[in-house]
Image: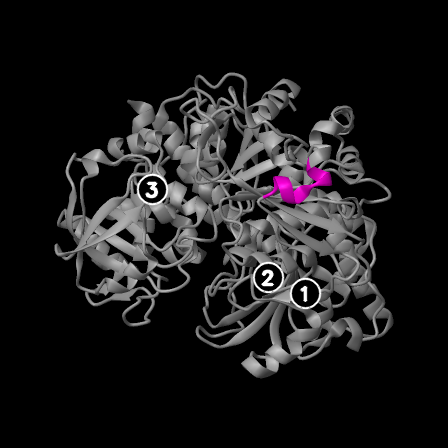
């Protein structure tokens, strides 16, 4: 932490600082907005200089392609690539990993050689899930990191400001440019009491999801404080900050404490713990903030850990939250399938030693009682280090003994990389998991799968009971789960999958086959032509939830994440047509096919969105694909932060209705004209004509710099000028 900058920040604001503000100002060259003026929450744009960048293999492909276009010799900050998204779960850890190495060899070779060429660290397939590996190796209190994955805030469990972004934002930092961010509001969450019984850190965030909803954190950093924080392990804190991505917050962060020091020491980073200990006063909010939180936070939420119950959320959205005691009523009144077709534990959210240990303690008790899983049950360790440690200490053996199937150290079913053979497409079924996201189609590509989320130990209990119509924490007579937060014998640290960058990269070449169907170098997007957008046809008017999964589906499409033209074949395939209720189809046919016809005829087009448009993952493909096919403008009732940022980066104009009810005025065959773009300016409303006749007013959040990106055609174009 930079004590000088913290003092400058206190002077700038004229008050004490929250923890988030201390970390933010510590990563600025000057404490001011990008024009040198006073910072205002949720109003000013400011420039930051993060400490590092982390990318997972699905998003890294496009980010690296953009970095190559920038023409730099090496990355300006430490950067790592983690191969965790392309491994498909089907038969088990070993065969699935072997198949992935063959199927994705071209992509892995590209990422490995690019890492070597440009000075990036490379984590091989099977090494672990990006966020668990980052927590074990790179996260540190008071640091700032960008990651090309929405669950990057996982590192907030170690007191780091870690923000999920699109590849273009990451490339800015990789090329030595600042990261531009709207100065966030701060939501304070006060934790008191102590977790006990079946209640776990996962239940803190599941409870918070019910309070904030999927958009309540948008434009804010969620900062935890209070005496309850230190009762939660560092990895438990990571669970809470990881899933904070679901309420839309910029990131979430915990203050430094003894649990973080213990985790740092256990992962061979005692020197960082010593440094953090010396700066403990800077790694928490100022005393005045803690004494009067309502005075300094935009909102204060209090959660009493003593009274918190285990929770289950879902289906279809992570903010449909309820205590486990109320799930039976929901099953009966909503007619959800009571018998789950599968139970799954792990993912980047819940795959720590403690998570696996608490789940295993239930398995051990079940074995003594003669119980085994009544449904298919899958286990995903978070990293090779966690896997090696739980294998040594016996937790994995206990979970396999009740019927658990070990999957690779990868994302797998959490992101749609699950090749199911037990369910027909469209067959309604329920699953229960300890994952973080449960949108329709998210896990297995089927919108008919109803996905419920809970803690690992509760998920195992449901696997043993075989029904959601009950409370297995009570019905089975099992003891409360228990596990040490850290292994008594220490972690069996395994970094064999890490490939260091080489010192001399002058002769290295990045591997891209000229005829590749999975990778293609990028062509710059065209600059704005200097004219208004007139009579744009509306490809899509989306109704309700339109996530980045709806805009650019994962699953089998992951293979094209490095080939913009090919992956554009799924654009808006999952979006719901407001006029018909159908997915992926308008009056002129499928959305991707019609978008392609518009592109081929050089016809620009636009999209109309509903609330929180583009929520979900950080995938910038959801912005690049429409841009590639000719989309110029998206007008929505509101945007999710990362998607709006990605649209700006790639030259698509994101507007919001000044009057949200104007959404209802737009007909299926109307056209939209966006006027006076030559005078586009920060804070200035934009007039839009519906079919050349009815005027409506729209707003935008573009800064001066972002308007320059728009006019140049993209941020990367502007950087290259």
Residue in the image at 82% along x and 45% along y: 487
Residue in the image at 62% along x and 53% along y: 347
Q: Is residue 508 magenta?
A: no
Residue 330 % position (x, y): 60, 77
Q: Are marks 3 and 2 in contact (CB under 8 Å)?
A: no
Please tell me the numbered disc located at residue 210: 2
Q: Are marks 2 and 1 in contact (CB under 8 Å)?
A: yes
Q: Is residue 663 left or right of residue 389?
A: left
Q: What residue would you read off at disc 1?
A: 311
Q: Is residue 484 left or right of residue 155?
A: right
Crowd class of label 2 (few under 14; some 14 to 19; many from 20; radius 10 Å) = some
Q: Indicate the secondary structure of the residue bearing disc 1.
A: strand
Q: Is residue 574 above or below residue 627?
A: below
Q: Quadrant of residue 385?
A: top right
Crowd class of label 3 (few under 14; some 14 to 19; many from 20; radius 10 Å) = few
Q: Nearer the viewer, mark 1 or mark 3?
A: 1
| Between discs 2 and 1, the one toward the N terminus | 2
Q: Nearer the viewer, mark 2 or mark 1?
A: 2
Which of the colour schemes (rainbow, by chain, secondary structure, one colour) is used? one colour
Residue 264 % position (x, y): 75, 34
Spatial CA span between label 2 and label 1: 10 Å
On-image quarter of the N terminus: top right
Please tell me the numbered disc located at residue 516: 3
Residue in the image at 65% along x and 34% along y: 19
């Amino acid at each position: 932490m930079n004590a000088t900058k913290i003092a400058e920040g206190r002077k700038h604001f004229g008050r004490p600082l929250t923890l988030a503000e201390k970390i933010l100002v510590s990563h600025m060259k000057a404490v001011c907005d990008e024009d040198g003026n006073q910072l205002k929450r949720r109003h000013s744009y400011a420039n930051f200089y993060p400490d590092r960048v982390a990318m997972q293999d699905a998003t890294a492909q496009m980010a690296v392609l953009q970095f190559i276009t920038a023409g730099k010799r090496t990355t300006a900050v430490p950067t790592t690539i983690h191969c965790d998204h392309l491994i498909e779960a089907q038969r088990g850890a070993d065969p699935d990993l072997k198949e992935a190495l063959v199927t994705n060899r071209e992509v892995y070779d590209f990422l490995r050689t690019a890492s070597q060429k440009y000075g990036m660290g490379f984590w091989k397939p099977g090494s672990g899930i990006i966020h668990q590996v980052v927590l074990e190796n790179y996260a540190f209190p008071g640091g700032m990191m960008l990651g090309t994955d929405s669950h990057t805030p996982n590192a907030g469990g170690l007191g780091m400001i870690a923000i999920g972004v699109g590849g273009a934002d990451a490339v800015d930092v990789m090329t030595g440019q600042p990261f531009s961010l709207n100065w966030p509001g701060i939501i304070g969450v006060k934790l008191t009491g102590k977790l006990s019984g079946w209640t776990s850190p996962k239940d803190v965030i599941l409870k918070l999801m019910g309070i904030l909803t999927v958009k309540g954190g948008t434009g804010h950093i969620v900062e935890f404080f209070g005496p309850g924080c230190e009762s939660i392990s560092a990895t438990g804190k990571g669970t809470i900050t990881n899933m904070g991505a679901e309420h839309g917050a910029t990131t979430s962060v915990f203050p430094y404490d003894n649990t973080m020091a213990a985790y740092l020491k256990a992962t061979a980073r005692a020197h960082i713990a010593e440094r953090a200990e010396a700066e403990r006063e800077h790694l928490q909010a100022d005393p005045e903030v803690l004494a009067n939180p309502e005075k300094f936070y935009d909102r204060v939420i209090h959660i009493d850990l003593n009274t918190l119950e285990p929770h289950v959320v879902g289906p279809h959205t992570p903010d449909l939250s309820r205590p486990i005691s109320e799930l039976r009523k929901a099953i009966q009144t909503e007619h959800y399938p009571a018998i789950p077709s599968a139970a799954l534990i792990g993912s980047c959210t819940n795959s720590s030693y403690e998570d696996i240990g608490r789940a295993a303690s239930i398995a051990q008790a079940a074995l003594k009682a003669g119980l085994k899983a009544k449904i298919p049950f899958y286990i995903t360790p978070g990293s090779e280090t966690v896997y090696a440690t739980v294998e040594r200490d016996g937790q994995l053996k206990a979970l396999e003994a009740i019927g658990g199937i070990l999957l690779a150290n990868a994302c797998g079913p959490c992101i749609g990389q699950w090749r199911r053979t037990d369910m027909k497409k469209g067959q309604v079924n329920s699953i229960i998991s300890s994952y973080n996201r449960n949108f329709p189609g998210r896990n297995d590509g089927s919108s008919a799968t109803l996905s419920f989320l809970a803690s690992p130990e509760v998920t195992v209990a449901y696997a043993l009971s075989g029904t959601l119509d009950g409370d297995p924490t009570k019905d089975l007579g099992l003891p409360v789960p228990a596990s040490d937060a850290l292994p008594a014998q220490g972690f069996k640290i395994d970094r064999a999958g890490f490939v260091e960058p080489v010192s001399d990269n002058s002769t290295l070449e990045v591997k891209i086959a000229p005829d590749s169907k999975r990778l293609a170098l990028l062509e710059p997007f065209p600059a704005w032509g200097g004219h208004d957008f007139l009579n744009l046809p509306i490809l899509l008017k989306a109704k309700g939830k339109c996530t980045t999964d709806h805009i650019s589906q994962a699953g089998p499409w992951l293979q094209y994440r490095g080939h913009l033209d090919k992956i554009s074949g799924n654009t808006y395939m999952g979006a719901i047509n407001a006029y018909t209720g159908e997915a992926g189809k308008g009056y002129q046919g499928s959305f991707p096919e019609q978008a392609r016809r518009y592109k081929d005829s050089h016809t620009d087009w636009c999209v109309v969105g509903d609330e929180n448009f583009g929520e979900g993952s950080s995938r910038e493909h959801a912005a690049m694909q429409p841009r590639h096919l000719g989309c110029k403008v998206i007008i929505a009732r509101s945007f999710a932060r990362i998607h709006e940022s990605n649209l700006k980066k790639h030259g698509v104009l994101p507007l919001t209705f000044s009057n949200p009810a104007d959404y209802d005025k737009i007909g299926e065959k109307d056209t939209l004209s966006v006027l006076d773009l030559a005078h586009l300016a920060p804070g200035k409303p934009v007039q839009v004509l519906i079919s050349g006749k009815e005027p409506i007013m729209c707003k935008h959040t573009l800064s001066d710099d972002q308007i320059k990106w728009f006019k140049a055609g993209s941020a990367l174009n502007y950087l290259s000028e």
